[in-house]
């Protein structure tokens, strides 16, 4: 079994705008991993959550329901 590679990609445009994108994270782990980067970069303009965020959240709810 191959471990999942976690990556944080930061893009800076010529205008100085930044985009932070995570890959390989599940649930809110991506937000926790980028929290300090976001604080350093300044106020967030928008946030787009990928399907992985919701899939993990759903999985956590299912696990809690079984307990």
Image (tube, rainbow, N blue to C red):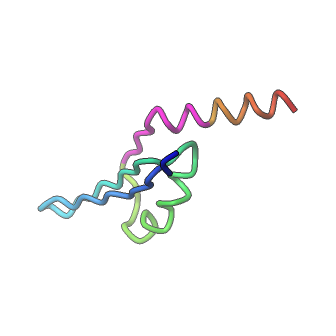
What is the x, y in percent for residue 59?
A: 66, 32
* Residue 52 part of the magenta segment: yes
Asked if 52 appears above or below 40 in the picture, the reply is above
Front residue of this view, candidates 61 and 16: 61
Horizontal side of 35 relative to 67 (left or right) equals: left
Residue 54 falls in which quadrant of the image? top right
Q: Residue furthest right?
A: 67
Asked if 58 appears above or below 45 in the picture, the reply is above
Asked if 7 appears above or below 51 in the picture, the reply is below
Asked if 49 appears above or below 22 in the picture, the reply is above
Which residue lies at the image location 52% right of the left edge and 53% below the top edge?
31
Residue 18 falls in which quadrant of the image? bottom left
What is the x, y in percent for residue 53?
A: 52, 38
Magenta-tinted stretch:
46-56
Q: Residue furthest left?
A: 14
What is the x, y in percent for residue 3?
A: 50, 51
Horizontal side of 26 relative to 23 (left or right) equals: right
Q: Quadrant of the C terminus?
A: top right
Which residue lies at the image location 52% right of the left edge and 45% below the top edge?
1
Q: Residue furthest front?
A: 1
Which residue lies at the image location 73% right of the left edge and 28% below the top edge?
62
How many marks overall?
0
Front residue of this view, candidates 11 and 66: 66
């Amino acid at each position: 079994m191959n471990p999942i590679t976690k990556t944080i990609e930061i893009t800076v445009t010529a205008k100085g705008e930044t985009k932070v994108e995570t890959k390989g994270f599940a649930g809110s782990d991506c937000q926790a991993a980028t929290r300090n980067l976001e604080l350093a970069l300044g106020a967030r303009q928008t946030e787009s959550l990928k399907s992985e965020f919701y899939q993990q959240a759903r999985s956590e709810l299912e696990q809690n329901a079984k307990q």
